[in-house]
């Protein structure tokens, strides 16, 4: 019975996400593991939106009230997708992964492949074991995340949201934890964290899948190994913090944007918009990332020379509207309940000392990226890769991912320079805040290292 | 000394233990790199990358007469070599702590035993005493000395006592009070309440008299 309860934690969002995926994309663009990895994130995002809506309507949250309507919606979406002949298998245009292109790189580098697979497996086992065996204990879990989830579970809703500290924080993760508890039928300090290693695993799969559409599978595997070599990511995947979820939604949205732009698929762009919207429901920072991604997509559209402006505008709307609707829904919910959006946590604060601040900010950023134990030596390897692989600079995907990464840094530096958040971003005791902010787009670093180091598909060895 | 290889006598084994212990800090959410001889360990790795790259470049120049333009950059080769070394060290550190410490500490233990390992804190022991003595669920107030408010203790107590002692909702008047780490705790017990459990000289749990 317990196993069945745990299974439903995943089956409902997976089914919903898969139906939504087929409805939007009309056909299966990804390998099966990647489809699961996207469907789970999509389903969880939709599920917590539904929980928020139920609470807004005053309907008590329970496993039944959450899952039955969602299963009906998923069934409807599958029916519509089937009606549009979405499930045809012939002539798939694979989105991320290599599809059926022959790739013998894994057998050519057999021993290195074995080492990489063992290393990734060890890290995954570490994350899953720790998450399942170590209970809730870290500051933010007790202070703001798990406590909210526990109250939502016992109160069957968000009735008492205003009594919490940091009321304005988005609720995707607390509601996800409550969803786990509704399925288990009780609050379990261990099993409640089950979703964190799973979302970590989903991201690793998508990281590999995305890379394998540009480089050989061996290099894609190396990219996944680089990703899991970051201690900080592995640690955060074992505790109930919101940052791994935000990393998943933000970076997958960026990957989907790139692919949607390449394939001119409006369905993929809508999916990217939904992921970005779910990111805004995960942490407040993602509201800023929404601006970053909007600028990034405008950059992609401007770079694309073909196509009339009207079509490009249409693509932009396909992406931005879902994100704004999700963000707007939560802001509306907050306003209705008299909760300020940022609660004064960030204000514009231009000062004449800005240039002094700039030096301090760069010092703190550099210290964290290059001299902490969070990221291995990956950021230095990225700098070396950029300098040493100038030949790869002309690859559009390299240019685009690098542009995305720079935009994130520009955003963070701007926030530190121009707002009251300077203290938390570049103050003396900024380690945790800054590390968590970098984590949200950190996967772009190993992505770029591999894209810069490996021969692109079709140019050289596969 | 459990959880480290170091034996404290400044031997080569000690240096190795310092480096290996540097990369995994169980139960912490950020990671500092130690300094060896006053220099950050990563800085020393970067210097070694640069030195190795110079060595590779010189080797190429001596062997070929000049460096080939199409060859992979020596800096890149050195970077990947040291990354592999670092991953090896970090994995060794992680595996050492994981198999040697984390698994024995947490496998087949109940929640109380696990939290004792993580915190070894009085606050969770206090929670257990309150939970063992509370007679019925109640709406509670939390009272503590000002220095306690800056620690994790109030949040840990609030989290683990909920829902039996609800210190989240504030609408209704309290029918119990949790006094933790406060001088003269009985003075914080309101009129009409009785002390149900005393944890130590500074902490107790009281409830409204029936």
Image (cartoon, coloured by chain):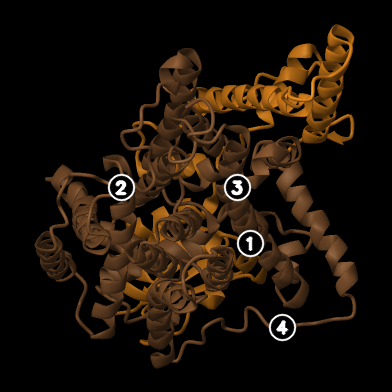
Q: Secondary structure at mark 4?
A: loop
Please identify, in this view, whether the residue under mark 1 or under mark 4 is nearer the observer: 1
In the image, the chain rendered in brown is A
Q: Are marks 4 and 2 on the same chain?
A: yes
The image position of residue A175, as x and y in percent, is 34, 66
Please state the chain letter of the residue tagged with numbered disc 4 in the rendered image. A
Query: How far apart are labels 1 and 4 at the CA level?
Result: 19 Å
Circle nearer the N terminus (4, 3): 4
Query: How far apart are labels 4 and 2 at the CA level?
Result: 46 Å
Callout 3 touching callout 2 (CB < 8 Å): no
Circle nearer the N terminus (1, 2): 2
Give the residue pinned by disc 1. A408
Give the residue pinned by disc 3. A398
Please rate how many residues cluster around mark 2, counting C-alpha atoms within 10 Å: few if below 14, some from 14 to 19, many from 20. Answer: some
Q: Secondary structure at mark 3?
A: helix
Please identify, in this view, whether the residue under mark 4 or under mark 3 is nearer the observer: 3
Q: Does residue A7 appear to the left or right of B149 in the view shown?
A: left
Please identify, in this view, whether the residue under mark 3 or under mark 2 is nearer the observer: 2
Q: Quadrant of residue A265?
A: bottom left
């Amino acid at each position: 019975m317990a196993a069945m309860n745990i299974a439903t934690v995943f089956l409902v969002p997976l089914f919903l996400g898969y139906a939504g995926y087929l409805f939007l994309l009309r056909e299966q663009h990804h390998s099966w593991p990647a489809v699961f990895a996207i469907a789970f994130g999509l389903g969880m995002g939709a599920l917590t939106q539904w929980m928020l809506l139920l609470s807004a309507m005053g309907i008590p949250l329970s496993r039944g009230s959450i899952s039955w309507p969602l299963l009906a919606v998923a069934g409807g979406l599958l029916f519509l997708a089937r009606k549009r002949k979405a499930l045809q298998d012939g002539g798939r245009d694979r989105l991320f992964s290599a599809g059926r292109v022959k790739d013998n790189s894994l057998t050519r580098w057999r021993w290195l492949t074995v080492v990489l697979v063992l290393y990734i497996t060890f890290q995954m086992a570490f994350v899953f074991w720790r998450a399942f065996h170590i209970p809730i204990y870290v500051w933010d879990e007790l202070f703001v995340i798990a406590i909210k989830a526990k109250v939502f579970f016992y109160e069957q809703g968000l009735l008492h949201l205003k009594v919490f500290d940091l009321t304005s924080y988005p609720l995707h993760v607390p509601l996800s934890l409550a969803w786990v508890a509704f399925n288990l039928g009780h609050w379990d300090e261990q099993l409640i964290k089950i979703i964190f290693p799973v979302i970590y695993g989903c991201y690793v799969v998508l990281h590999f899948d995305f890379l394998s559409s540009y480089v050989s599978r061996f290099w894609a595997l190396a990219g996944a190994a680089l990703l899991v070599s970051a201690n900080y990511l592995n640690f955060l995947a074992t505790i109930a913090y919101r940052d791994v979820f935000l990393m998943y939604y933000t970076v997958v949205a960026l990957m989907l944007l790139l692919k949607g732009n390449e394939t001119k698929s409006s369905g993929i762009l809508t999916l990217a918009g939904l992921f970005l919207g779910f990111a805004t429901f995960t942490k407040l920072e993602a509201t800023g990332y929404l601006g970053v991604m909007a600028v990034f997509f405008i950059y992609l559209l401007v770079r694309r020379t073909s196509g009339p402006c009207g079509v490009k505008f249409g693509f932009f709307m396909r992406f931005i509207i879902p994100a704004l609707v999700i963000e707007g829904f939560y802001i509306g919910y907050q306003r209705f309940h008299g909760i300020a959006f940022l609660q004064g946590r960030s204000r514009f604060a231009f000062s004449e000392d800005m240039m002094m601040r700039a030096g301090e900010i760069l010092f703190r950023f550099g210290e964290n990226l290059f001299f902490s134990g969070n990221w291995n030596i990956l950021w230095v390897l990225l700098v070396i890769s950029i300098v040493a692989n100038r030949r790869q600079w002309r690859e559009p995907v390299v240019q685009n991912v690098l542009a995305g990464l720079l935009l994130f840094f520009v955003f963070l530096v701007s926030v530190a320079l121009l707002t009251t958040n300077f203290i938390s971003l570049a103050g003396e005791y900024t380690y945790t805040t800054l590390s968590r902010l970098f984590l949200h787009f950190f996967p772009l670093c190993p992505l770029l290292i591999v894209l810069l180091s490996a021969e692109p598909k079709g140019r050289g060895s596969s | 000394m459990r959880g480290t290889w170091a034996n404290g006598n400044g031997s080569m084994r000690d240096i190795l233990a310092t480096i290996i212990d540097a990369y995994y800090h169980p139960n912490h959410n950020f990671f500092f790199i130690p300094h060896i001889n006053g220099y950050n360990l990563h800085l020393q790795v970067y210097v070694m990358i640069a030195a190795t790259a110079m060595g590779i470049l010189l080797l190429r120049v001596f062997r070929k007469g000049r460096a080939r333009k199409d060859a992979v950059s020596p800096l890149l080769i050195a970077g990947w070599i040291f990354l592999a070394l670092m991953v090896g060290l970090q994995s060794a550190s992680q595996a050492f702590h994981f198999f040697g410490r984390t698994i024995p500490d947490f496998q087949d233990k109940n929640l109380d035993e696990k939290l004792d390992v993580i915190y070894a804190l009085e606050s969770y022991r206090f929670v257990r005493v309150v939970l063992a003595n509370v007679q019925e669920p109640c709406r509670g107030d939390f009272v503590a000395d000002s220095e306690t408010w800056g620690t994790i203790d109030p949040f840990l107590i609030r989290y683990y006592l909920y829902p039996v002692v609800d210190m989240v909702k504030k609408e209704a008047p309290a029918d119990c009070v949790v006094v933790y780490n406060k001088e003269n705790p009985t003075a914080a017990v309101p009129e009409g309440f009785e002390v149900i459990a005393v944890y130590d000289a500074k902490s107790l749990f009281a409830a409204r008299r029936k």
